[in-house]
Amino acid sequence: MIATQQSIAQQNSWSLDELELRFVFNPSDDEVKKTIDDATGFIITGLAIESAEYHMETSRIKLTNKLSAELPTIILQWVKSEK
């Protein structure tokens, strides 16, 4: 995670303190393509979560009795904080 943060900070000449982490779950193909083309984030696939699951209809992670559940594709982006 730190390496991704450092990469984006260096790419944009931002300090690490200025960055906040944003996740986009289940992005559209266009969002994935734009992220790749613009080199503005990292595409994560194949992750699972324990004792929770991603609910597509509400776009939220919910607790569950399942041992584990697969997560959809995720875009991880470090963005400049608006604080």
Image (tube, helix red, strand yellow):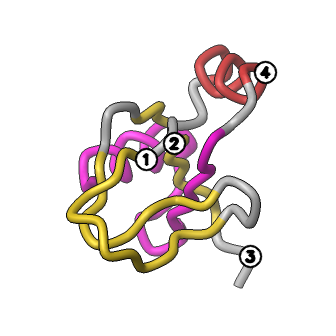
Q: Which residue is mark 3?
A: 82
Q: Mark 2 belongs to which amino acid?
A: Ile
What SS does tag 2 mark? strand
Compute the Cα span from label 3 to label 1. Answer: 28 Å
Q: Mark 1 belongs to which amino acid?
A: Leu
In this view, the residue in front, 36 or 8, is 36
Residue 80: x percent and y percent? Answer: 64, 62
Upstream in sequence: badge 2 or badge 4:
4
Q: Which residue is mark 2?
A: 74
Q: Is residue 37 left or right of residue 2?
A: right
Residue at position x 63%, y 41% from top?
26
Mark in the foreground, 4 or 3: 4
Upstream in sequence: badge 2 or badge 3:
2
Residue 5: x percent and y percent? Answer: 38, 52
Q: Mark 3 belongs to which amino acid?
A: Glu
What SS does tag 1 mark? loop
> Mark 1–mark 2 contact, CB under 8 Å?
yes
Mark in the foreground, 2 or 3: 2
Residue 8: x percent and y percent? Answer: 47, 43
Compute the Cα span from label 4 to label 3. Answer: 25 Å
Q: Is residue 73 magenta?
A: no
Q: Counting other residues with Cα less than 10 Å from the Cα at mark 3, is it few (<14), some (14-19), or many (20 or more)?
A: few
Q: Which residues are magenta?
A: 1-26
Compute the Cα span from label 2 to label 3. Answer: 22 Å
In this view, the residue in front, 41 or 10, is 41
Residue 29: x percent and y percent? Answer: 72, 20
Residue at position x 27%, y 53% from top?
1
